[in-house]
Amino acid sequence: MKTRFQRHHALSWLWKTRVSQPVAASVAIVVLVAGVWRSSPLWIGAGAVLVLESLLGFISVRAKLLFWKRPASDDHGESPAISQPQPIHARRADGDRSDSLIDIMLAEGRYALLLRPQVIDNLSDQHLNQTVVELQEAMAIVPRGQVVLEKTTDASDDGRRDRDELERYHRRTVDVEPVFIDRYPVTNLEYQQFVDNGGYDEMAIWDEEVLPAMLDFVDRSGHPGPRRWREGHFTPGEENHPVVGVCWYEAVAYARWVGKRLPTDAEWYKAACWPVTISPGNWLQRMYPWGNAFERTRANVWGSGLDRIVAVDRFPEGMSVGGVHQLIGNVWEWMSGPFGSADDNSLALPVPMKSIRGGAFNSYFEKQATCQFQSGENPISRKDNIGFRLALGACDLAPKAAELLLSGDARIDDDTPVEEVSI
Amino acid sequence: MNRGCDLPMDSYRLAHYSVQVPCYVCGGGNTYDAEMCRHCQAPMALSHQSVAQKVCPNMVAVLGTSGSGKTVYLGMLMDMLSRCDDPLQVLARGAFSISLQQLTTSALAQAEFPSKTPNEPDRWNWVHCQVRCKHHRHPFDLIVPDMAGEAVLQEIDHPRTYPVIRSFLSKCTGMIVLIDAIRLQSGEHDQDHFTMKLLSFLSELFDAKESQHTGKKRKKKQTHPPIALVLTKADQCERCFDDPTAFAKTHAPGMWQYCQERLPTYRVFASGVAGACAYRNELGGSRRWIPLRIEPRGIVEPFQWLIETL
């Protein structure tokens, strides 16, 4: 486990080099001058070699300094891990090393990276099937379609808009492309893989604007990790609990590390309310994933009486139609988008906020833990009741993988049954 | 033409009028049908209930500056405790006791904070409830009013402005003092000063009461009721939740010193009701501070500690 101090090893190395370089150069010049003064070819030669080495060292330091200052790629907003994927050189016949790498990635839950168009050709059929099955087990499909995002506040009803304007303002129809969404929120155990594998040191997966704040992304003992962890580890017994105490940027970095992304509001909402078209332009959308009435046995909110976070597999009765668990209650979930849109001037936020949805174990009012309800939070807040789940666009997968997923033909050799999916 | 009519002699009314009903808060005499005490404006229902149910309610005060969150804290506390039975259970006595939690929760559910409590005592919400807890063998009654912060400050600066405050505070067996953590964190000293002023006022009050009863002054430590110091709006500053005592020590040094020197029983807590807040632009260009979601935290703990200390 790397400490905050160890994360600064690059800086200390530069400092040391910066000090030693002038000393080495001075010694080289002294040797060269002494050789000229004594007319000794040996001293002159030695001096010349030392000067040359100092020059080369200087150039090398400059290059490293330049590299250290710009760790991320030039295309802002795009994950370097996604836009410039590291190819996995798998040997199909007898690739022991590559096989182990794929197994490691599968064990770490990074199967989504293996199904990228740039990587998939390196997988054997067996590995491809295995990876697809992993994805099917961990993620549920949200089919293509439209969803009506509803504003839950009536702040805009200030009398200046007519009825149609108000209707348009409150109800916004959004097209959603097919997307896979995690069946469960990301757990402590899954996030531990990210921490253990140096996720907090991989500058390439972090947004550039958050780098100055990263030294604060530590646990209670000062190690990189979620806020409530200690010594870089979650509390024993909570491996299956959703990871909390992570800010929006940490969630995004983890998503890039596993090759996924945070869901948009529309994707999350569609997965939860599962709209049904009753006539063109009219949809029936559920208030809760299980129906339109709140039931305390189906979600962990304040009224459920637990008053704490529970494991992600609790409350199975609250599962959505598509097979996504705990969308409501237990922990709020970070969305990829902002809270409050540019055309909405009803709210003035003290800081730009990111959207969160779903409610948490301490959500007091049931109407604030519905599929429709949206709240916001400062993206660098690391609160104890905000976690996240991830999404993966079907369009981000290689066509071969998408085909397997849609046809449901993926099988592992041991005849593990594969869930049928359809779009 | 005058039309004559027969009016029955309501002699029982006359009999009732002849007996003065003492106000439970100030002890002043009132007629039996008075709604509010004519001396202090406390609701006479408190007296009638204590007589009818043969109970002697304890009194607990919730104090703090204007805008420190007294109404929200008290309303949420009552609503939370009336919805669960562990570790404490609260049952309202009288319909008027439910008004506060109704007012608070209906405002919060609509993503609004309840409007400011008026200074006039006859417009305050009073709660009379029965409390059950494991620490006390028998359930007991409690009276908690939602007093306006400005009125309390005025009574401190100009004694006898609001007789109900002095009468009530002198009978209190426990206090909850709310301090706005956001204002403390932003470096404003008014919270620190107000709390010191309030604690000093309470000390004077209890010293005077004690000297009246015993004829000589005793040590303050024996007379002072327990005080829970609650840093409110702590959801906006997470450090406050991590260690409320350290936060109070750092941001309210005057209050902290006073507590250490003068108060025998006190504890610092942190509480928050809103998960996040924002401004809402109102018609006419004004802005209103609203809660984006309701996530009560640290509400019950100070009250529970106080009840166990009583």
Image (tube, coloured by chain):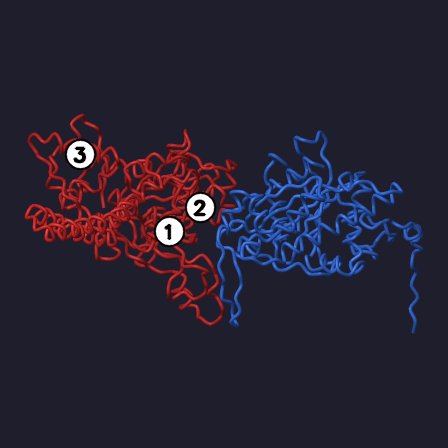
Chain colours: A red, B blue
Mark 1 on the same chain as mark 2: yes
Mark 2 nearby-residue class (10 Å; few <14, some 14–19, many ≥20)? many
The residue indicated by pointer 2 is: A383
Q: Residue A22 or A285: which is nearer the viewer?
A: A22
Closer to the chain start, of discs 3 and 1, is 3
Closer to the chain start, of discs 1 and 2, is 1
The residue indicated by pointer 1 is: A213
Q: Nearer the viewer, mark 3 or mark 1?
A: 1
Task: Relative to A238, say whether A259 is above or below.
Answer: below
Going 15% across and 43% down the picture, which residue do you hit?
A403
- Pointer 1 chain: A
Q: Is residue A142 visible?
A: no
Q: Which quadrant is home to the N terminus of chain B? A: bottom right
Q: Position of residue A212 (x, y in %)?
A: 35, 53
Closer to the chain start, of discs 3 and 2, is 3
Mark 3 on the same chain as mark 2: yes
